[in-house]
Amino acid sequence: VSPAAAEEPLERRAIISGIGQSEVGRRLGRSEIDLTIEAGMRAIEDAGLTRDDIDGLSTYPGMGAGTGGFAGPTSPEVQDAMGLSLNWHDGGGEGAGQMRAVISASLAVAAGLAKHVLVYRTVTEGSVQGTGGRQGIGGGGGGGGGVPRFGGFMQWSLPFGAVSAANWLAMVATRRMHEFGLTREQLGAIPINNRANAGLNPNAIYREPMTMDDYLAARMITTPLCLYDCDAPCDGSTVVIVSHRDYAPDLDHPAVHINAVGTALRGRPSWDQFDDMTTMAARDAGASMWERTELTPRDVDTAQLYDGFSILAITWLEALGFCGRGESGPFVEGGANIARDGLLPLNTAGGQLSGGRLHGFGLIHEACVQLRGEGGERQVVRPGGRDVEVAAVANGGGPIAGTMLLTRGVR
Amino acid sequence: LTTNLVDVEPEDVRVGLPVRVVFEHSDDVWIPLFTPADDAGSGTGAAS
């Protein structure tokens, strides 16, 4: 599936022309459609467009993906609320991570199905969990009244008390500790780094500095993952506008080009039956992205890697080739390599651990901010005063994974 | 396979612990669980 040498990957015809984020908080008490419109209008204005210019709409996960805080509004609801007239529309929870909505949009504009696609991801998990818990995703079918029955993967995990991705990924972390000697102090370098960056992000949820003592003293959630290894449910909406690159010269800011995407899932699609539990789908998505570009991991100026749990960022560092297999623990230890002035500035807005669980899209937003040089206090400046030119973004964990390589201008 | 270990203290569980299957009968299903194998000792102290 790799492109021939002289053949340009189709996604390279797409740019992210505008970005927008709503208010972000733990308990905003605002509706998901309200937050989506706020982020959407900001993104449209940022792209120098009007609502009439938007002729495509895409989201993750869309309809049927559970209710109450996780799924966000459906695309018909957003289309109707924003009064959009569409040539292409799309939504779904199956694909290359949460960013599947962005990847689909890039292919739609490359194929001429739409000119400007509004892509959104909205969560109100903070509010919903604060009022008694939310329905999850992936429970599968069943029911018919009385005691709910679970189908799908969870019928094999719920009877044993493995009720959440936290439990499933705790086993991945345990395996990494066994196989590679990963330590809790190495794992803790991720949340501590992200918290330091969140301190410079006014929209982040948790901004107070965190020490290693704070991390090690936090209560255990599911061994060996403690409270600070798990991301922070929040309310918020993130929108990106995906346009054809022909529109790039009309922007009043640098265009963010999609250089390559990674969508592969070559292993078994399972949380506990993957051939290598220490890598899972991240390995495949990462490999397939590098097969589609001339750029290499050494060209990347900042990485925004999915940290729904700290162990996922650890996994992504290896999956994307920033360090060797099993080497991410020593790579992040002490935090110097992943700091804003380090070898690979990581999760510069605080990630999901401190910035809030915007479910992948917060990381995409921050990659664009950094590529456009709009990070303010937290803007990354590379050695020699060079601007950020290449950013890697990763979404997902377990058998769910998608990646994008984004560039400032054409590379 | 996601399952549970029974008849062993959590602190005695380790990667590589020899186990054998036991089945728990619940209504119309037999649920596979695992317990330390005889050659792993009684469970307590097996992780040393």
Image: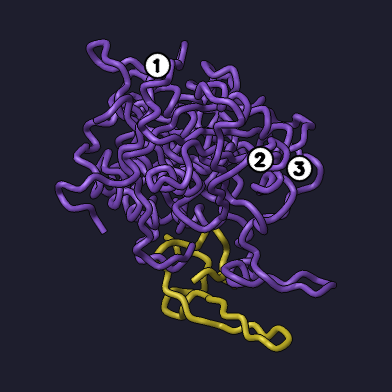
- Residue ID for mark 2: A123
Q: Are marks 3 and 2 on the same chain?
A: yes
Where residue B27 appears, x then y in whole percent? 73, 86
Residue at 40%, 20% (x, y): give it.
A372
Q: Which residue is labeled 1 in the image?
A: A373
Q: In this view, does A395 lie above or below A301?
A: below
Q: What residue type is labelled 2?
A: Val
In the depicted view, which residue is nearer to us: A334 or A208? Answer: A208
Side of A79 relative to A29 (left or right): left
- Can you tell which chain is drawn purple? A
Residue at 45% of width from left, 58% of height from top? Answer: A399
Residue A146, image x, y percentages: 84, 72
| Disc marking residue A213 | none
Q: Nearer the viewer, mark 3 or mark 2?
A: 2
As measured in the structure, the alpha-carbon distance from the residue carrying label 3 to the one carrying label 2 is: 10 Å
Q: Which chain carries label 1?
A: A
Single out the mark in the foreground, 1 or 3: 1
Question: SS for tag 2?
Answer: strand
Q: Which chain is yellow?
A: B
| Quarter of the figure with residue A129 | top right
A296 over A202 or under it: above or below: below
